[in-house]
Image: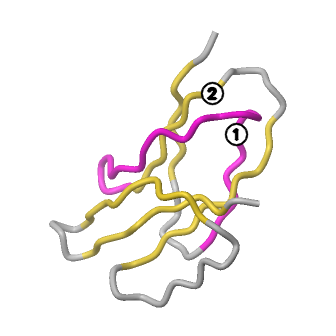
Amino acid sequence: MSAVWKYPLAVTDVQEVEMPAGAEILSAQVQDETLCLWALVVPGWEEEPRRIRIVGTGNPFDHETGVKFIGTVQMHSGLLVWHVFEELV
C-alpha cells in the first residue's frame, strides 16, 4: 500500500532528503510559507537519501551531474522564485 508523504525543505542550494527506496517525487509547492516536497512512497521500505537542488531565478546553475525538474515555486508574494530539481546519480 502506498501513501503520499510531505517533506519540508530548507531553502538552500543542495540538501539530502531521506525517503523510502523507490519513492516517486510528485511536486514541490509552498505550504504556510514553507517549501515542501511531496512524494508517493511505500511506508516501511528502507530509506535512502535523495539529493534535492534549489536554484533561484537568474542564479548560476551547474547541472553536469544530471537533474530532473520537480517544480517552480514562488514565496513571499512572488518576490522569490525557486526552481526545484532532483540530482540524478
Q: Quadrant of residue 51?
A: bottom right
Callout 2 amino acid: Val
**Where 66 falls versus 9 (above or below)?**
below
Q: Which mark is residue 19?
A: 1
- Quarter of the picture holding the C terminus: bottom right
Provide residue 11's location: percent of width, then percent of height. Answer: 48, 69
Residue plotted at (68% across, 21% down): 42
Q: Chief secondary structure of the magenta span?
A: strand
Provide residue 78's location: percent of width, then percent of height. Answer: 18, 69
- Quarter of the picture holding the N terminus: top right
Which residues fall within the magenta stretch? 14-34
**Where 62 falls versus 50 (above or below)?**
below
Callout 1 amino acid: Met
Left or right placement of residue 34 versus residue 76 in this view: right
Residue plotted at (72% across, 46% down): 18
Measure the C-alpha gap from mark 1 to mark 2: 8 Å
Provide residue 67's location: percent of width, then percent of height. Answer: 59, 64
Name the residue that disc number 2 marks: 41
Label 2 residue SS:
strand
